[in-house]
Amino acid sequence: MKTFFPYSLLGLYLFVFLIPLFGAVDFAGPQWLYLSILNTILLTSFLFFKLPVFEVKSSVLSVFSFFSIFSFFSFLYAINLTLWAHDFFRLINVLVGLFVLSSLFKNFQLKFYVVSILIALSCIIESFFSLSPLIIEFIDNGMLIFNIDTLNVDAFKGVTGNRNITTASIVVKIPFIFHLIVQTKKIIPRILYSFFVLMPTLVLFLINSRAALLSLLLILIILFFYLIFKLHITKKIRYLFLFFFIFIPTFLSYFLSLNILPASNKSAITKVSQIRVTNESSSNRFELWSNALDYIYNNPFIGAGLGNWKVESSMYWGSLGENYLVPFHAHNDFLEYTTELGLVGGILFLLIFFYSYKRLLLYIKSQPFNVVVLFCSLSAYLIDASLNFPFERPIMQVMFMVILSLIINIQAFSNEN
């Protein structure tokens, strides 16, 4: 029971996507409320039982804390204090969750392998909800699903309410499934974990989100070179077989998607190969980034205030017509925080990633595969943060907190393998 308890607490975070809408328009609202209640209960409980929540030492935590403090003082120049309070308390929610999870990993000595099982399970459940329309279609019509003339990819948005959030959430978790495949020593569990790769990768190939596909490609490339290196160094044939357990289900899901997707839909390889560095192909992201950079150039030290880019961005898009929907976000968390907090705030946010990668490099020799898994997962999040706005989404912030907490406590897993 004592062993199960800390993992159940982690599960309360990982399965945030199961929180129902409760009549809300967006899943984010109820999920943020749930996280705030969960953080309050756990923080209070940890302090009551005198667990050293705020005694975890890490450059990552220090920079994140300083970034939050710096964000707080932006209320002095924020145009809209309601927006400032809205985003600031979400930021504090993430910070408190980061302290709670870091304390959880440190004080209860959770195993990386079991944590990976929980993350993999959440990924599979997410993928199941995403693929449920296809599963229902298969139950009703059998093999006729391979003769579909039209396919609405929005049907695969699953529990997030948005297909791009779904793919971003899934691809961040996929490295932990690969961790299970590599680290298990028994053939039956390895086959089972290999089967687990099919569902999430099929979701990625069906939805065809460029950011998620690029992240998956990066993960596979890093994993390929890791296995080649281990095969060369150790001369153990088991690393050769791992290629089959990882890459065959990935390629199988890709070929399944080719047979399911109508001819009018682009395949994943075509989608990636046809990425163009143009404003139109990036859904006007270049225009969004250009506007953000222009604002930063004119306001390098005092920004709009936390959450207030939603107000300031309107002056760039108002000229496009009264019926145009003004975007709330810059589709790049780094640029958006810089517009709101100035260059200092933007640099502080960037330093969170810098110190995270730096800490991973410190343990590359003692824990090479744990480092590879966390590097891949953090990099997938980084790609999404560079193209979208994951800081607004609880399902992404939970994984961000888990990844950073694992990195902060990575030394605790040194004897596990």
Image (spheres, rainbow, N blue to C red):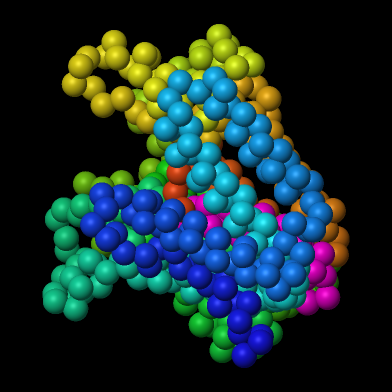
Instruction: Give the residue displayed 40% in from the left and 36% down from the top.
Output: 274
Q: Quadrant of residue 167?
A: bottom left
- Majority SS type along the magenta span: helix
Residue 176 in picture, x, y percent from top left: 59, 67
Quadrant of the rendering where the C terminus is positioned: bottom right
Relative to 25, residue 73 above or below:
above
Instruction: Give the residue displayed 37% in from the left and 14% down from the top.
Output: 316
Relative to 275, residue 251 above or below:
below
Residue 75 in picture, x, y percent from top left: 55, 27
Of residue 17 and residue 67, the one placed in the foreground of this image is: 67
In this picture, residue 68 sits left or right of residue 309: right
Residue 240 in picture, x, y percent from top left: 68, 72
Relative to 214, residue 300 above or below:
above
Relative to 8, residue 90 above or below:
above
Residue 380 in picture, x, y percent from top left: 56, 49
Q: Quadrant of residue 402?
A: bottom right
Of residue 285 and residue 104, the one placed in the foreground of this image is: 104
- Tell whether position 327 is magenta: no
Q: Quadrant of residue 107?
A: bottom right
Can residue 57 be seen in the rendering of this structure? yes
Can residue 251 be seen in the rendering of this structure? no
Of residue 214 and residue 102, the one placed in the foreground of this image is: 102
Instruction: List the single residue furthest toward the front.
Output: 48
In this picture, residue 233 sits left or right of residue 225: right
Instruction: Give the residue displayed 63% in from the left and 70% down from the top.
Output: 45
* Magenta span: 395-417
Instruction: Give the residue displayed 54% in from the left and 20% down from the top.
Output: 77
Quadrant of the rendering where the N terminus is positioned: bottom right
